[in-house]
């Protein structure tokens, strides 16, 4: 049923259409489109009404620009503030209506301070009607009794005195109301409290059912299957996540082995020198990564391993049998540790591999110290571990009580090196070891705040003490060994501190050495025992196999510098020289890097073992010279029968030179040198130039005075010679890795595999993008501004022309009028003249 | 002792007073004799004070033109007026003063020597407007005689010689005069002169060579130097001569005459021949000296000792300049590259740090030598290195048939920087001057950088202090 359109609809439509004026279809211009697309509307930018918009712009200019032109050089302006004067949308009637409304509103508006705002005063001739009326009523001369009647009659009688409440009554009523409300509120509150209490009691009864762990429930008989399931679910919820079962021994061993494997792999990568670059590259993160640590086929992260161990130990079950478990572990560990220690002693003679293995084992076997170190590594400083340590220290205290009762168990942290020295002074080596270990335990970082710094300081003092021990006579070997272990464990925590301290030490020693060499004109002296021991400590604490290491690399450089700048002048120099060579070889034993200085120094040492007559034709390398004191230093005068075993560094260095200088020592030295040479060959067998490297050794080795040597040494020398002669490396012709040919520039279209539907704009950088966008915008704005200015000028010019034309036309018209009047005048005149005739 | 110093200060004061008196009034001129007599004192402070005073006084008189014209001196003394008499007396005093000052040049104390020299310079500066040639010549001769002392090392005074020479405006003539005297002195030498004399002589030559000299003196200088070098030198002086001779060569008229000397020292070997390289190079480069076996000699100088020598930086710098020519035959360059890389096998790290870039520089300048690094033709595998180490003739040492396996070996060098350099084998010319002065200490300080972040540690606990094999603590 069609509804007939009413007047209101018409008005509404008209108003709606007034916003956008009807466009004449003849005015619309549509841009030519290259490819028409079916079912696609003509886009906004494809069509336009140039005529309309032009006229619009023109009008606007006229309203603004030309007005400005008119007002130019005029100081006064007239502002039309009448309502709707500038609004072209309003018709004249509407304007008037609005204006009237505004006027009314103004009149009805009261000031902020008017009190009777809700009364509308009726007026007559501008005077309040009420006042007038009252006047008339008041002025009536009738009696009071009439008042009621008149008021009823005249004004409907709606305001009665009896109905009106007095102010007092009103207030009373208000008070009563508020009291009632208050009471109601109270009642409501009480009720709510009651209900919550009731609910609580009900909840408690429910909770006892839900949580059987806390309130031990009475033994239930024959639980239903549903209840069982329900309980299971409740259990699962409370345990919150899968628990770790306690690990079996095999699992632990496996974990330990895996950890070591990872560490070994890291060491290897550092050795190749690729560690740093690998580390610098950020891990690739997929766009779909939820950052929840879940990855499908991500290789096991190396760094995370330690954390995992830590979290494992943290996430250990909190059950009541936890402590027992730990005790069990400890028990087991202790026993296994003993086993391993026993095994260690047996394993000593075996090769490097087994050696390594025993080391691994000894780490996994747990002295308390080891475990402590591990805990520190893992960074767990929970109360639990602290408690266990305390327990251990107590246990140790008990042991200590039986043995050395005179040592206190708790030491205050020494504030300086002197204090530490004072603490350790006067105790035997073993006691000192105990004191140091107790010091460490007392100040375990997990025990108190600030212990970490204290322990760091203790560590530094211990390093200093280590150096001091080496200068003492005689050297307390056991203590040094014990201290090394302690230092290693501490250095695992304070890596950077240790590295800094030892690096500083090395640099200092090196600069001292360099200054000495400078003074002596290129000849240095061999270092003291303290320096040597420190170098060994560095080798023990830091991985010497690294391609580049802030401590070991300078240390190795220092060693080789000494080997090139110091000539052995005495037997103790020879000991130090041999020691430095073997230490340098130990530095490179894993990385198998080449040390030319060791080769030349060993050759020089062998040369000094030659008898004076057979030194001809041997080429020497600096620092050895044919005229130096080293010549004949190691050539024996009398035959020697046996070889002694290992050299004790501290004892040899404490001996006098004359004590050392005998045939026995010389033979031992030569034997040691030949051993080292053999080791060199082992290490560098694969170098392409090994034959050339070892060539200088052949001549002096060949002319050694074998007659003086014991049979064992003779064998050694001859086998070494055989080995040297047979060393051969096949030389492959050198070729540079072929360079990849630079591909030709291709003019094929660039195909994007995943096209998002938008062409990527701009560069890869956000800043670049922003800059590009802004420059583009500036360009466009510039263009628009220029265009606008042009149009403005056009309008102005046109206006000027118009005014001139108008003036001209005016003048012409006036001229015409004048001429016309003149002509008519003339005509009249002539007519009169004619008429006169 | 106290008395002595007190005494000397009082005399010093009196000298100053007397000087002031003389300067204020000519009538006090007789005090001059007192000052001259002070010059014979034993105290060095007094002597230097009197020297200074004498210098000041005569500078004053000379500027006042109190001196007689040299032409008038021929007139008999009686005929002279009083003023003239005074001036002739002054003249006499002046000559004695000059003698005294010259004597003081040979004094034991260096302070006295220097103040005497200063006094001479001030007087001569005042005199220079009416310089008397004869006086000057005599004076110079006197001074030279003192400087060429056979007993005392006059190095400090000789440093001041240019000051003296610069007094005269036409200093070229004076230099010539000096040279002439020097020449005469050297000629009269016996076969074994004292070392000190030779040292003094050499230093004077060096100072004179620093002056501006004309062609005539250049010739003279050449003669003097040649004459001088004929004598047998002590080793210290020999080195000094070799290091300084390049600057003198520029001032000589025919430096080619040094060729004998230089080639002889080049043949001596060791550090001496190393130092003569530069002089020889100048001769060859600028004066077309044809030195037949120069490169062969240099090739033989590449010995392991070079890395230890004090003049390592100098040697490598010179070698780099000699071998920088691209017109050298490739077999020669290859031989040098091969020999140097051979040396690297037994060189200390600081030496190899220079040598490896040196070798790579050589190859980069001579693309024909790239076969050493990249060989395409021929056998792929060789049994032994074809390069003949002991062959002295570079054309026969078969270096071009070889490869630089030494660099491959050095890739495994313990020094990370060196290892990287050897591994990269960057064929690109590098500025050697930056690394020439690198010592082991520099390398260590560059390796021992400040530690930041993580430091790798050993993960196996050492069982005590683990010593290397065959050693216990």
Image: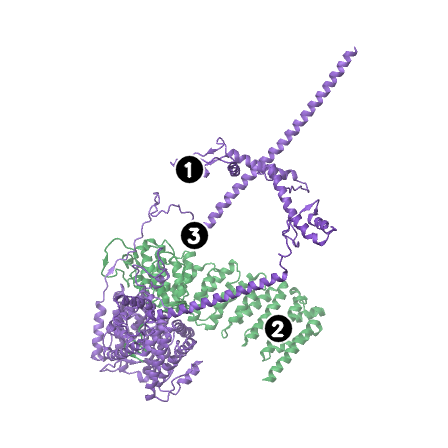
Chain colours: A purple, B green
Say left or right for A251 vs A569: left
Say left or right for A414 vs A741: right
Residue A632 visible in the current orientation: no
Quarter of the figure that contains the N terminus of chain A: top left
Which x, y percent locates residue A572? 33, 80
* Residue matched to label 2: B52
Q: Secondary structure at mark 1?
A: loop
Which x, y percent locates residue A718? 21, 74
Say left or right for B151 vs A400: right
Residue A499 visible in the current orientation: yes
Give the number of the mark in front: 2 or 1. Answer: 1
Quick one: B243 or A339, which is closer to the camera? A339
* Residue matched to label 3: A765
Q: Secondary structure at mark 2?
A: helix
Q: What chain does badge 2 belong to?
A: B
Which residue is farthest right?
Answer: A836
Q: Secondary structure at mark 3?
A: loop
Q: Splitting the image into 4 quarters, where does residue B370 fall?
A: bottom left
Residue B115 versus residue A652 in the image, above or below: above
* Residue matched to label 1: A41
Quick one: A197 or A763, which is closer to the camera? A197
Quick one: A184 or A113, which is closer to the camera? A184
Q: CA distance from mark 1 to mark 3?
A: 37 Å
Quarter of the figure that contains the C terminus of chain A: top right
Say left or right for A468 vs A713: right
Quick one: A80 or A356, which is closer to the camera? A80
* Pointer 2 and pointer 3 on the same chain: no
Q: What chain does badge 3 belong to?
A: A
Q: Earlier in the sequence, mark 1 or mark 3?
A: 1
* Pointer 2 and pointer 1 on the same chain: no
* Local crowd size for mark 3, using a 10 Å CA cut-off: few (<14), some (14–19), many (≥20): few
């Amino acid at each position: 049923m069609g509804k007939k359109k009413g007047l209101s609809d018409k008005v509404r439509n008209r108003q709606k259409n007034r916003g956008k004026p009807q466009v004449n279809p003849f005015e619309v211009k549509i841009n030519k489109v290259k490819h028409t697309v079916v079912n696609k509307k003509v886009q906004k930018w494809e069509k336009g009404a140039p005529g309309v918009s032009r006229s619009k712009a023109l009008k606007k200019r006229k309203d603004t620009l030309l007005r400005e032109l008119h007002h130019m050089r005029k100081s006064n302006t007239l502002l039309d503030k009448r309502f709707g004067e500038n609004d072209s949308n309003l018709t004249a009637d509407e304007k008037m209506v609005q204006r009237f409304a505004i006027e009314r509103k103004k009149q009805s508006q009261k000031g902020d301070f008017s009190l009777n705002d809700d009364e509308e005063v009726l007026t007559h001739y501008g005077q309040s009607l009420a006042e007038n009326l009252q006047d008339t009523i008041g002025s009536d001369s009738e009696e009071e009794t009439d008042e009621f009647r008149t008021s009823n009659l005249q004004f409907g009688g709606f305001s009665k005195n009896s109905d009106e409440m007095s102010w007092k009554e009103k207030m009373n009523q208000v008070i009563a109301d508020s009291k009632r409300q208050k009471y109601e509120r109270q009642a409501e509150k009480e009720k709510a409290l009651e209900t919550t209490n009731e609910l609580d009691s009900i909840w408690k009864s429910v909770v006892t059912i839900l949580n059987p762990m806390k309130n031990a429930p009475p033994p239930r008989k024959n639980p239903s299957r549903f209840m069982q399931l329900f309980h299971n679910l409740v259990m699962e919820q409370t345990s919150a996540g899968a628990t770790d079962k306690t690990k079996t021994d095999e699992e632990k061993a496996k974990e330990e082995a895996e950890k070591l494997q990872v560490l070994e792999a890291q060491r290897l990568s550092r050795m190749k020198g690729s560690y740093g670059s690998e580390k610098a590259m950020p891990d690739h993160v997929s766009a779909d990564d939820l950052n929840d640590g879940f990855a499908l086929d991500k290789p096991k992260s190396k760094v995370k391993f330690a954390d995992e161990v830590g979290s494992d130990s943290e996430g250990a079950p909190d059950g009541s049998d936890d402590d027992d478990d730990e005790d069990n572990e400890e028990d087991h560990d202790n026993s296994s540790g003993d086993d391993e220690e026993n095994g260690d002693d047996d394993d000593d003679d075996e090769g490097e591999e087994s050696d390594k293995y025993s080391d691994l084992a000894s780490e996994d076997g747990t002295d308390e110290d080891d475990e402590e170190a591990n805990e520190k590594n893992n960074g767990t400083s929970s109360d639990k571990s602290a408690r266990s340590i305390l327990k251990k220290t107590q246990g140790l205290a008990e042991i200590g009580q039986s043995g050395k009762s005179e040592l206190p168990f708790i030491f205050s942290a020494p504030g300086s090196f002197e204090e530490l020295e004072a603490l350790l002074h006067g105790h035997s080596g073993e006691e000192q070891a105990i004191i140091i270990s107790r010091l460490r335990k007392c100040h375990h970082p997990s025990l108190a705040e600030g212990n970490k710094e204290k322990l760091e300081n203790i560590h530094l003092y211990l390093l200093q003490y280590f150096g001091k021990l080496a200068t003492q006579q005689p050297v307390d070997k056991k203590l040094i060994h014990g201290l090394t272990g302690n230092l290693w464990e501490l250095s695992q925590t304070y890596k950077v501190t240790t590295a800094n301290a030892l690096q500083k030490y090395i640099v200092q020693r090196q600069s001292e050495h360099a200054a000495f060499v400078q003074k002596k004109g290129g000849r240095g002296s061999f270092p003291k025992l303290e320096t040597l021991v420190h170098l060994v400590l560095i080798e023990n604490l830091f991985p010497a196999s690294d391609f580049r290491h802030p401590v070991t690399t300078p240390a190795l450089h220092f060693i080789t510098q000494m080997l090139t700048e110091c000539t052995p002048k005495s037997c103790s120099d020879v000991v130090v020289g041999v020691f430095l060579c073997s230490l340098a070889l130990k530095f490179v034993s894993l990385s198998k890097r080449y040390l030319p200085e060791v080769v030349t120094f060993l050759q020089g040492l062998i040369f000094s073992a030659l008898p004076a007559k057979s030194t001809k034709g041997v080429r020497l390398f600096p620092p050895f010279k044919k005229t130096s004191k080293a010549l004949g230093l190691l050539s024996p005068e009398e035959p020697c029968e046996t070889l002694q075993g290992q050299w004790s560094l501290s004892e040899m260095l404490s001996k006098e030179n004359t004590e050392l200088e005998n045939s026995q020592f010389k033979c031992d030295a030569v034997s040691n040198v030949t051993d080292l040479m053999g080791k060199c060959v082992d290490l560098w067998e694969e170098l392409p130039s090994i034959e050339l490297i070892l060539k200088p050794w052949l001549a002096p080795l060949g002319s050694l005075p074998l007659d003086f040597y014991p049979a064992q040494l003779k064998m050694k020398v001859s086998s070494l010679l055989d080995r040297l002669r047979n060393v051969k490396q096949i030389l492959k012709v050198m070729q540079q890795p072929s360079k990849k040919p630079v591909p030709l520039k291709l003019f094929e279209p660039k195909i994007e595999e995943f096209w998002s539907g938008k062409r990527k704009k701009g560069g890869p950088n956000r800043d670049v993008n922003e800059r590009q966008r802004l420059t583009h915008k500036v360009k466009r704005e510039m263009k628009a501004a220029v265009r606008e200015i042009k149009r403005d000028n056009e309008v102005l010019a046109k206006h000027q022309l118009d005014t001139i034309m108008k003036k001209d036309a005016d003048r012409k018209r006036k001229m015409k009028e004048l001429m016309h009047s003149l002509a008519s005048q003339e005509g009249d005149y002539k007519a009169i003249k004619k008429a006169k005739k | 002792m106290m008395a002595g110093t007190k005494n000397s200060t009082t005399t010093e004061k009196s000298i100053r007073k007397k000087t002031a008196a003389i300067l204020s009034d000519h009538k006090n001129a007789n005090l001059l004799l007192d000052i001259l007599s002070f010059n014979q004192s034993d105290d060095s402070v007094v002597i230097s004070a009197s020297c200074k005073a004498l210098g000041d006084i005569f500078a004053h008189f000379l500027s006042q033109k109190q001196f007689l014209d040299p032409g008038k001196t021929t007139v008999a003394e009686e005929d002279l007026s009083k003023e003239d008499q005074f001036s002739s007396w002054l003249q006499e005093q002046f000559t004695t003063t000059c003698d005294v000052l010259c004597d003081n040049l040979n004094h034991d104390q260096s302070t006295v020597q220097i103040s005497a020299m200063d006094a001479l310079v001030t007087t001569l500066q005042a005199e220079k407007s009416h310089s008397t040639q004869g006086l000057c010549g005599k004076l110079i001769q006197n001074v030279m005689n003192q400087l060429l002392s056979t007993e005392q090392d006059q190095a400090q005074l000789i440093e001041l010689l240019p000051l003296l020479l610069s007094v005269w405006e036409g200093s070229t003539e004076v230099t010539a005069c000096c040279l002439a005297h020097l020449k005469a002195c050297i000629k009269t030498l016996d076969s074994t002169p004292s070392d000190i004399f030779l040292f003094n002589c050499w230093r004077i030559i060096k100072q004179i060579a620093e002056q501006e000299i004309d062609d005539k003196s250049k010739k003279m200088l050449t003669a003097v130097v040649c004459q001088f070098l004929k004598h047998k030198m002590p080793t210290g002086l020999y080195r000094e001569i070799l290091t300084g001779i390049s600057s003198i060569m520029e001032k000589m008229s025919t430096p080619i005459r040094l060729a004998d000397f230089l080639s002889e020292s080049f043949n001596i070997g060791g550090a001496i021949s190393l130092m003569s390289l530069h002089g020889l190079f100048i001769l060859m480069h600028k004066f077309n000296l044809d030195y037949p076996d120069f490169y062969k000699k240099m090739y033989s100088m590449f010995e392991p000792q070079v890395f230890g020598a004090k003049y390592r930086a100098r040697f490598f710098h010179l070698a780099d300049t000699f071998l920088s020519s691209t017109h050298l035959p490739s077999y020669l360059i290859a031989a040098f590259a091969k020999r140097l890389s051979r040396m690297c096998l037994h060189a200390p790290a600081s030496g190899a740090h220079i040598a490896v870039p040196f070798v790579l520089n050589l190859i980069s300048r001579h693309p024909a030598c790239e076969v050493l690094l990249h060989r395409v033709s021929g056998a792929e595998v060789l049994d032994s290195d074809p390069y003949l180490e002991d062959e002295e003739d570079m054309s026969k040492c078969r270096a071009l048939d070889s490869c630089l396996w030494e660099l491959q070996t050095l890739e495994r060098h313990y020094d990370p920087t060196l290892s990287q350099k050897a591994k990269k084998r960057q064929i690109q010319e590098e500025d050697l001057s930056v690394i020439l002065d690198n010592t082991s200490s520099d390398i260590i300080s560059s390796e021992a950088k400040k530690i930041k972040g993580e430091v790798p540690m050993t993960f196996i606990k050492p069982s005590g202090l683990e010593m290397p094999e065959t050693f216990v603590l």
